[in-house]
Amino acid sequence: MPLAARMRPRTFEEVVGQAPVVRELAALARRGRVPSFILWGPPGTGKTTLARLVAGAIDAQFIELSATASGVRDIRRAEELARGGGMFARPVVLFVDELHRFNKAQQDALLPLVEEGVLTFIGATTENPSFYIISPLLSRCRLFILRPLTEEEIELILSRALADPERGLGDEPVEVTDEAVRALARAADGDARVALAGLEEAVELARARAGEGERVVVDLEQLRELASSGALRYDRAGDEHYDLASAFIKSVRGSDPDAALYWLARMLEAGEDPRFICRRMVISAAEDVGLADPYALTLAVSTYQAQEQVGMPEAAIPMAMCAVYLASAPKSNSAYLALGRARKIAREHGTLPVPRHLRNAPTRLMKELGFGEGYRYPHSFPEGFVPQLYLPEELAHLRLFEPKPIGSEVEIVERLRSWWQERYKKSLQGPPDHEPPTGEKKKPPANRPPPEES
């Protein structure tokens, strides 16, 4: 077993940090009747450990599920076990790690178990429960908040691992300098599991370099080598989180479905929240694909809804489908650029008055003042179009939207060219200051040759 698993506390007294929560859970366990509760805190702060200690203290059967790989069927099995045991059966504790990964339907399945007290439910989450846990479930569970461990607390955990001859490294000829222990504690950023894993890797590296019979020494220099050559840790709040998301979106924008699938798989395998990925695809559908393929946004929103209803791991299938579609679709950021221009103009020109013929006139006084006068209803004219001005007069010839001759925008270019000419030549008695949209094609970038057929 890894060092972090071997050093998991066996009693409440062995738990380092989280003193208020530990005291209350220990008191509840001593009474023998523990209510369902949720543990919210960063990784490596003892959520799983506390759940196991509570279950052991009340002599309960401990069922552990991971929300990333479990679903309603697994919840039903735990319910059957709890209901079928009879009067003298041991109680059941159902522990769901990464609870925020459960969608609404999966969380709904937990509600009757908690309401009826069929079993003791313990959820663990690293995300704010008010955003990710449905209100009915959250209101029926107590909430305990765990804080990141301090460097001093992690140093104590590392010292125990180095001194413990049974579960730790106490019976091995290993010497870890005080500077190295402090550096490991500082690099762990409040996560005891990361600190113990780093210690174990450092010792293994030092052991591999030491000669036969030599004492193994871990110092700062070896830790630096380990940090530069070791496996990259995926931190959902750190650089790796944003780097992978950036690589994924840029692959979609760059029309490379193979790269998009690779980065999507990397994020899923690393434990990224599928909702985060789906939100990014919704944004990309609007920003990068845009009006070149308006259906892309519909598909992205449907994919977000599908992962909410289906849950992982099956939701990865529609997510892959959406990523491939977005990467393969024609691209246009014309609407995105137009919005930026519009906001810039709005800031520069302030609160220009709405033209009188466009104003709402719900009262007689407003009609007498001329509000709405002269407005022409487009549906009363052939083809649903009438040339009239919709901008303030100061911005009469403003053109913000520049459609591109790509995908569905080819048709938009043709329609707007005709409407633009009619609107300004007829309503303003003269040619516009700028030419109407032409949709002239720009030279496309060189494409990568397609993969050879297998």
Image (cartoon, rainbow, N blue to C red):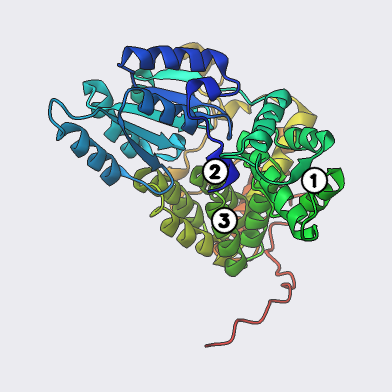
User: What residue does disc 1 label?
Assistant: 218
Check the image and name the residue furthest to the front. Answer: 213
In the figure, is residue 41 to the left or right of 398? left
Gap between marks 1 and 2, in whole Å? Answer: 39 Å
Foreground of the two, 428 or 335: 335
Image location (x, y in percent) of residue 337: 70, 48
Three-letter amino acid code at disc 2?
Answer: Phe
User: What residue does disc 3 label?
Assistant: 291
Foreground of the two, 103 or 142: 142
In the figure, is residue 323 to the left or right of 255? left
Closer to viewer: mark 3 or mark 2: 2
Image location (x, y in percent) of residue 62: 34, 35
User: What residue does disc 2 label?
Assistant: 276
Three-letter amino acid code at disc 3?
Answer: Leu
Q: Disc 3, disc 2: CB below 8 Å?
A: no
Q: Is residue 244 above or below residue 371?
A: below
